Image: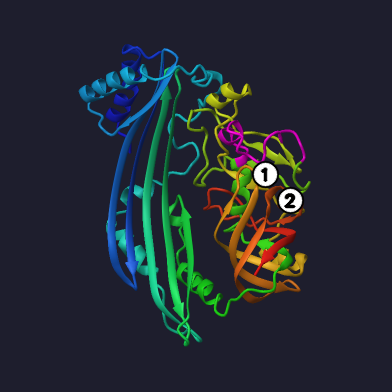
């Protein structure tokens, strides 16, 4: 999608920056196009076409650092833009920690952009009418339901193409191209007494031929109807099982706390945890970043540093902080990559477990299918989230639950980790399966 001329102009900006006095420069040229068809109650409601192009330039000038962006790639305008950007950077305070990453750390394999096999050639012949047909084909059948009726339905079909080039004055040049096809459905059902409940489901894949939307609307209806009659149960300590769609809510705060900015600002509950066992011995999280054919897989980070599959947490021991070049200089640490590319919680204690198997093994407790609001203190790890889901007993889901809070501390929560399934949804950015914990506090 990035044309030869656009690429050449972007790469020329590196030389323009050097000519204007920058010792080093990094550029990121990104271009994406998205088409969307929204439906409302079975009819097309809105059609959207979005095209975005931007050139981001990071300048290292006389010990100073500045970032600038533009969407104008005319040669003359670009030269003037860079000249002004260099002049403005000279007005900033010196910052000796701002440097390009060492060339030997940078990616050299992502030359075509298709190495991760996330680009579908059929995208080029997939037009607006095809997207409209796809959206209308997924409309929910509102007939045949007992005990409720479907009162509203919103669907969204989208097709996207992304293309990114990252290059710097040390010789880095890497590229990523990918496509994505999505369909989502959100429905509201109403019971005879006028109570309404909403449900949502989606499918996403880089490949049109793998997009199965046949059951998306039905699943959204099922999830809405499953909440009928939901109410709090008595507060107390329960086993907790969390669905694979919601597990990121418990994993992301841990990964964020391992990030350099949080650590450097003393705003992380994972400070001084590197090399220490701070979690249950059953917890292993890896950066599974080279999963070909799956959206989110990457060969490089935003600095152009090469990614590689690696341990983040192994048997409860913290193995890695995420430290970019700048924060490494500030903290006196060795740099890694800027953030995990594709974090994956590994199955525990055995492969092949799905939600139902984990419910049977845990026996009784609360199965969480949604988190509603709440907050997490990034400095202490304390959290409080509203939840919805089901009480389960003897491994079987019973009545729906809502209007409750789950509270605790992430360090303590993960010490009570019981199970991780083998059922992560590959369409999500983090590969988090069904998770189970013991002795979790719930308040009604």
Q: Where is 82 relative to 39, above or below?
A: above
Q: Is residue 226 above or below residue 367?
A: below
Tag 1 residue: 285
Q: Which image quadrant: the N terminus?
A: top left
Which one is earlier in the sequence, the residue at label 2 or at label 1?
A: 1
Question: Seen in the image, is 32 located left or right of residue 119?
Answer: left
Quickly name the residue at label 2. 412
Tell me: 170 left or right of 307.
Answer: left
Q: Is residue 267 magenta?
A: yes
Q: Nearer the viewer, residue 305 or 79?
A: 79
Residue 80 locus on image (x, y percent): 24, 21
Q: Residue 370 or 48: which is nearer the viewer?
A: 370
The quadrant in which the C terminus is found is bottom right
Secondary structure of the magenta portion, mostly? loop
Question: What span is in magenta?
Answer: 257-277
Of helix, strand and loop, which one carries label 1? Answer: strand
- Residue 386 percent coordinates (x, y): 58, 63
Local crowd size for mark 2, using a 10 Å CA cut-off: few (<14), some (14–19), many (≥20): some
**Is residue 431 visible in this depiction of the protein?**
yes
- Residue 418 rendering spot, x and y as whole percentages: 76, 56
| Residue situated furthest left in the rendering | 76
Question: Residue drawn at (60%, 28%), measured in percent from left and top?
Answer: 336
Residue sitting at x 38%, y 62%: 156
The answer for how far apart the CA atoms under marks 2 and 1 are is: 17 Å
| Disc nearest the viewer among 2 and 1 | 2
In the rendered view, tell whether residue 317 sits above or below residue 17.
below
Q: Using the rendered image of the protein, determine whether residue 139 is visible from the camera's viewpoint.
A: no
């Amino acid at each position: 999608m990035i044309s030869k001329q656009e690429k050449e102009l972007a790469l020329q900006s590196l030389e323009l920056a050097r000519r204007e006095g920058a010792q080093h420069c990094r550029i990121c040229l990104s271009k994406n196009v998205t088409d969307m068809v929204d439906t409302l109650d079975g009819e097309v409601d809105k059609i959207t076409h979005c095209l975005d192009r931007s050139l981001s330039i990071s300048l290292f000038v006389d010990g100073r650092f500045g970032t600038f962006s533009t969407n104008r790639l005319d040669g003359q305008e670009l030269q003037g833009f860079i000249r002004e950007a260099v002049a403005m950077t000279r007005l900033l305070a010196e910052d000796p920690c701002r440097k390009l990453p060492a060339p030997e750390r940078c990616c050299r394999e992502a030359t075509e952009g298709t190495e991760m096999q996330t680009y579908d050639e059929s995208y080029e012949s997939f037009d607006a009418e095809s997207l409209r047909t796809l959206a209308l084909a997924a409309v929910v059948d509102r007939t045949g339901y007992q005990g409720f009726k479907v009162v509203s339905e919103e669907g969204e079909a989208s097709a996207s193409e992304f293309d990114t080039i990252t290059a710097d004055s040390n010789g880095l040049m890497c590229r990523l191209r990918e496509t994505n096809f999505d369909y989502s459905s959100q429905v509201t059902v109403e019971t005879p007494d006028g109570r309404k409940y909403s449900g949502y489901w989606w499918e996403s894949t880089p490949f049109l031929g793998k997009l199965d939307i046949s059951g998306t609307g039905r699943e959204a209806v099922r999830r809405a109807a499953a909440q009928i009659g939901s109410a709090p149960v008595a507060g107390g300590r329960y086993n907790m099982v969390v669905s694979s769609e919601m597990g990121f809510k418990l994993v992301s705060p841990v990964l964020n706390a391992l990030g350099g900015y949080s650590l450097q600002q003393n705003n992380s509950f994972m400070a001084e945890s590197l090399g220490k066992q701070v979690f249950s011995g059953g917890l292993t999280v890896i950066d599974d970043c080279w999963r070909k054919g799956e959206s989110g897989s990457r060969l490089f980070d935003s600095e152009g540093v090469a990614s590689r599959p690696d341990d983040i947490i192994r048997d409860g021991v913290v193995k890695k902080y995420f430290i970019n070049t700048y924060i490494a200089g500030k903290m006196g640490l060795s740099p890694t990559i800027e953030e995990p590319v594709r974090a994956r919680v590994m199955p525990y204690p055995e492969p092949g477990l799905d939600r139902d198997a984990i419910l049977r093994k845990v026996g009784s407790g609360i199965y969480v299918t949604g988190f509603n609001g709440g907050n997490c203190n990034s400095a202490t790890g304390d959290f409080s989230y509203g939840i919805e889901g089901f009480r389960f007993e003897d491994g079987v889901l019973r009545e729906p639950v809502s209007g409750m809070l789950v509270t605790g501390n992430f360090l303590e929560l993960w010490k009570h980790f019981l199970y991780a399934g083998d059922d992560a949804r590959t369409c999500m950015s983090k590969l988090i399966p069904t998770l189970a914990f013991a002795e979790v506090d719930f308040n009604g």
